Amino acid sequence: MKIIYMGTPDFAVPALKALNDSEHEVVAVFTQPDKPKGRKMILTPPDVKVCANTLSIPVFQPETFKDGKALEIINEYNPDVIVVAAYGKMLPKAVLDAPKYGCINIHGSLLPKYRGASPIQQSVLNGDKITGVTAMQMDVGMDTGDILHVKETEISENETSGELFDRLAYLGGELIIETLSLLEQGKITAQKQDESLATHTSKIDKTYCPIDFSRSASEVHNQVRGLNPWPVATTKIDGKNIKIYSTKLCNKSAEAGTIISVKPLIVACGEGSVEICELQPEGKKRMPSQAFLAGHKLNVGDKIG
């Protein structure tokens, strides 16, 4: 198949590489415009653009689809299908209808669960045991199109959203290759999504970060791993903000927020407790909790949070 690929962040890179290495031909890549990043606001290309350049694939970065210029480019290439992964722009119906096989989206959840912007983080925040990637026939709605093919995977107890993100990105590459093969063979029967099972996600921001130790240990643990690597769960120790990068579940109990042990550092929750394994004080580097305790006097019975 002749493919136009649309994607922007690192999640979309493995699928682009998989398609480029396959029997299919990626004739062009669409991605978001370069954006200023960092303290010095240096204009930085998206990960997909960097990848496409290394693969010598033509790259287009339209600001909008409303003026029809992007559609003209698409029609010139006359693709059999447009594959989309975390592109970040809504596609108009004229674009969705342009290729023979339409537009197929690689989504980081088992639709209709977790439509929207943060499906991978939400699956970890909610303590799900199973997730996956869905190949979906795109329509004008937000992740509402028919399901073409899925691949499932288990989420381990201590897996972070960053680790799951990387795994699902590669799984998405496998998924799209299988999906296109099945489409060519006429072996896919599209399935309507059950709207009664649909859930929606919004963008994660720093309002998710503060830890409430009155919640159960499982909820606190899921919060910590779900917000790793960004924006990272936080608590306060001696009035200072501390980022918490990793925890482990424990069975000990006491009043919520109370330090139960300092070797290792265990804090009581509303139900159960968590061991704080890795943290980062303000203005310092990320470190094991024991390295932090070497320079900070904490005692059993102290309260944090």
Image (cartoon, helix red, strand yellow):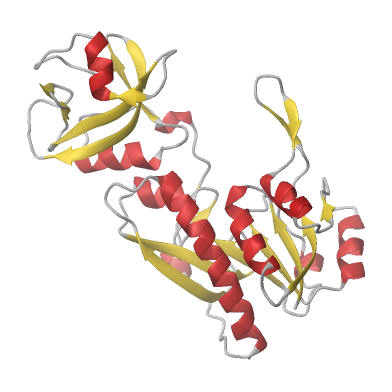
Q: Quadrant of the C terminus?
A: top left
Q: Would you say 45 lies left or right of 107 here?
A: right
Image height of 301 relative to 81, above or below? above
Q: Position of residue 286 (x, y in %)?
A: 39, 24
- The residue drawn where x is 31% and y is 9% is 239
Say whether residue 126 is visible: yes
Residue shown at 65%/19% (left/top)?
39
Number of numbered tags placed on the structure image: 0
Of the pair 194 and 77, the residue shown nearer to us: 77
Residue 263's quadrant in the figure? Answer: top left
Residue 152, above or below 6: below
Quadrant where the N terminus sits is: bottom right
Q: Would residue 226 appear left or right of 254 to someone viewing this image?
A: right
* Residue 251 on image: x %, y %: 9, 39
Using the image, determine if residue 238 lies above or below residue 35.
above
Judged left or right of residue 305, residue 233 is: right
Q: Nearer the viewer, residue 208 or 181?
A: 181
Please, is residue 249 above or below residue 129 in the view? above
Residue 109, horizontal then vertical, whole percent: 47, 60
Residue 132 percent coordinates (x, y): 44, 64
Q: Residue at x 18, y 41 (%)?
A: 249
Residue 111 can be seen, yes or no: no
Residue plotted at (22% across, 35% down)? 215
87 displayed left or right of 157: right
* Displayed quadrant of residue 93: bottom right
